Amino acid sequence: MFDTFKNRLEITGTLTTITALRISAGRSSEPIASDLPVIKDALGQPLIPGSSFKGAMRSRLESFLRGILGNDRKLVANPAVEDEWSITSQEMNKLKEQYKNDLELTTVIIQKTDLPSLLFGSPWIASKFQVRDLSVVPDTWFGQYQERDGVAIDRDTETAADGKLYDFQVVPAGTQFEFRAVVENAENWELGLLMIGLHQFETEQIPLGGGRSRGLGVVKLEIDKMYWLDVNKKPEKLLTYLQELVNSNLGDKLPSYEDGKESKQKWTQSLITYLTENIPKNSTTTTHTQS
């Protein structure tokens, strides 16, 4: 699946905090610091880990897929519980004993892997989707964090519990972060799944970080560019692309690139077709088409 380069989609854009954002770095040990500081880079500036963005998107897409395909772990696994993985460690050991040929083993693993893991990865298969840590856009960051107070409530008295007052940092609303992501060797339906996930961020449907029940973490993604390259079974095109690549700068639109935004509808339709074909026969889910 990864030993031959087939295609690549590069996505760039800006993620803006609509409300304050709290992605905690854990409890601070500093005596005069905030109890719960946010994650920062080496320069002390706010940072959104790519894993936080990717994990939030995966969780949302998994909930959609369960609504369509049911709770069959072979189709939509639960990454947090090994017994609910599409391939558990014990099952993987059995497969390794059964298939000694690497190509045969890889083929079987892909066949048994649940749909989200094919795109986002799992303990046994690499991710096709990579998200860089999101660094702050300098012009939108003024060097200050907001401090908020929090308190645990005593369930008996319904008042503040003794000794449970704390404070935490948040990144102010209106702060922008640079978004860069790449997906390689993806099938059309996987790209369709990715388009659905990105659209959720574009429409402020997926919050990030903690304090979401308080209204924190609402973000909006604005996609600037989507560069698409498909060289599957086209060695001459790959050679041309490599020549263009070594003579270009980061972010340049190479002649070999196509505008990925023009393929969004095609990829989304491919996803719908793929999921329709995989709906369990005993499922009560029905699909509706417009005439």
Image: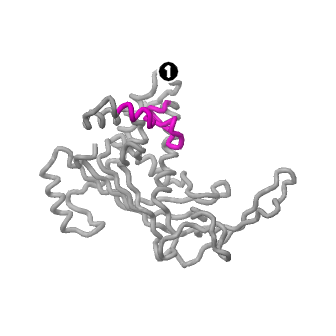
Residue 222 coordinates in the image, percent (x, y): 45, 60
User: What residue do we see at 43% from left, 35% from top?
Assistant: 87
Using residue 91 as the reference point, say whether residue 100 is left or right of it.
left
Residue 93 is covered by the magenta coloring: yes
Residue 75 coordinates in the image, percent (x, y): 44, 33
Q: Which residue was labeled with disc 1? A: 282
Give the crowd class for mark 1: few <14, some 14-19, many >=20 residues within 10 Å: few
User: What residue do we see at 66% from left, 68% from top?
Assistant: 35
Residue nearest the viewer, comparing 280 with 88: 88
Which corner quadrant of the image does residue 171 belong to? bottom right
Residue nearest the viewer, comparing 134 with 103: 103
Q: Amino acid at mark 1?
A: Asn
For the magenta stretch, what is the residue range?
72-95
Q: Where 268 falls versus 17 (above or below)?
A: above
Q: Quarter of the image containing the C terminus?
A: top left
Q: How many marks?
A: 1
Residue 276 coordinates in the image, percent (x, y): 41, 30
Q: Where 151 falls versus 85 (above or below)?
A: below
User: What residue do we see at 21% from left, 63% from top?
Assistant: 245
